[in-house]
Image (cartoon, rainbow, N blue to C red):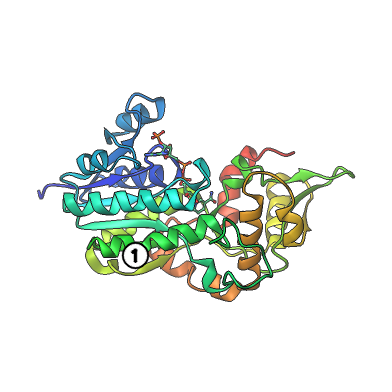
Amino acid sequence: MAEKKVIAVVGATGAQGGGVVRAILADPGGGFTARALTRDVNSDSAKALAQLGAEVVQADIDDEASLERAFAGAYGAFCVTFFWAHFSPDTEIAQAGNMARAAKSAGVEHVIWSTLDDMRQWVPLTDDRMPTLGGRWKVPHFDGKAEANHLFTDAGVPTTFLQTSFYWENLIYFGMGPQRGEDGTLAITFPMGDRKFPAIAAADIGKCAYGVFKRGGELIGKTVSIAGDHPTCAQMAASLTKALGEEVRYNEVPPDVYRSFGFPGADDLGNMFQVMRDFEPEFSAPRDLDAARALNPELKTFDDWLAENASRIPLG
Ligand SMILES: NC(=O)c1ccc[n+]([C@@H]2O[C@H](COP(=O)([O-])OP(=O)(O)OC[C@H]3O[C@@H](n4cnc5c(N)ncnc54)[C@H](OP(=O)(O)O)[C@@H]3O)[C@@H](O)[C@H]2O)c1
C-alpha cells in the first residue's frame, strides 16, 4: 500500500483545525494522515488528539522556523490564523507570511489557506455607510485574511483559498444565542434584515477542507467558498423555536445599534453583518450548498446542527 500523505494542521486543538484532524482520522483508508500542530504538546487537548491517532508536534505561527520543522515532510498543510486572540489584521498577515514561506521551504505540495472575503470590494474605504476601522479596514477579521492571500501565491505555494462562514457554534460560545427580553421572551439579535445568513457547523469546515485535499491538485489556485445553510434570521428563530420547544423571536436591529453594543469586536461584526445584508447575493451565491456538499456529503443544515446542539445553547 502507498505511504499515507501527511497533512500538517495548524490550530489542530481549535474549531477549524480540529475538524480537519478529525475528518482525516475518521477516514483511515483515505490515504492521508494528520499531523496536529499546537503550541503545547502537553495540553489536554493536544493529548486527546494524540489518543485519536494524530501525530502531535509543537509549532507557533509567530515562529517561522517552528513551522518549517512542523511542515517538513508533509504533503499538505491546513493554515489558519486566530483573529480573536489579538484583534489585529496586521498580525494575521504576518502569520500568514510565516506559514506561506515555511510551506515553500518545506516543499508542501498543497496548502489550504482558511481565508475570508475582502469586504472592501463591496464597501470601499471611501464609502461612509459604515465606519472605517483601524484606518485600513471595513471588516478587519475578513479584510486582513483576504489581504494575506497573495502571500501564498507570491511564495509559490500551491494553494486553495477556502472562504469559510460564520459558525453556528457562536450561538453557544460567543454570546450570540437567544437572550431573554424584558417580557421574558427569547430572541436572537442580528442586523441582517430579512436577508440570507450563510453559516456552517464548525466541524464541517474541516470536513470540506479534507474534501479539498482528497481532490488532489484539482482545486489548487481556486477559491472555494463554503456554507452549510442560508437561512434568514427569521427562519433561524423559527428553527430555534422548534428545537428548544420555546418561542424564539428575531430581534432585528440596525447595524449602528449592533456596533454600539460595546463588546470587543462589536464594530467589526456590525460592519460584517451590514455587508452580508447589503450584498447578500454577492456574498451568498459563491457559498453554494451543493458544491460544499460535494466536498463533504455530511454537511449539516441549521436544523441538522440544532438537532445535535440545541441543548448546548445557553439561554441568556
Ligand atoms: N467564529 C466564527 O464564526 C468564524 C467564522 C469564520 C472564520 N473564523 C476565523 O477562524 C479563525 C479562528 O479559527 P478557530 O475558530 O478554529 O480557532 P480556535 O477554535 O479559537 O482555535 C484556536 C487554536 O489555535 C491555536 N493557536 C492560537 N494561537 C496560536 C499560535 N500563535 N500558533 C499556533 N497555534 C495557535 C490554539 O492551539 P494551542 O493552544 O494548542 O496552540 C487554539 O486551540 C479566526 O481567525 C476567525 O476570524 C471564525
Q: Is residue 226 left or right of residue 237?
A: left
Q: Position of residue 312 (x, y in %)?
A: 62, 38
Task: Give SS at disc 1.
Answer: helix
Asked whether 24 or 11 is in front, the reply is 11
Residue at the outermost left position: 1
In the image, residue 151 sits, relative to residue 245, either above or below, namely below
Q: Quadrant of residue 179?
A: top right
Q: Position of residue 82 (x, y in %)?
A: 45, 45
Quadrant where the image shows the C terminus = top right
Instruction: Name the residue: 50% across, 48% down.
Output: 88
Residue at the outermost front position: 135
Query: Callout 1 environment at 10 Å: few (<14), some (14 to 19), or many (20+)?
Result: some
Q: Is residue 217 left or right of residue 249?
A: left
In the image, residue 187 sits, relative to residue 60, either above or below, namely below
Instruction: Name the residue: 30% across, 46% down.
Output: 24
Q: Quadrant of ligand 1?
A: top left
Q: Quadrant of residue 40?
A: top left
Asked whether 49 or 97 is in front, the reply is 97
Amino acid type assigned to the residue bearing label 1 in the image: His
Residue at the outermost right position: 183
Q: Number of numbered discs present?
A: 1
Residue, disc 1 = 150
Q: Is residue 69 left or right of residue 44?
A: left
Instruction: Name the residue: 22% across, 63% down.
Output: 156
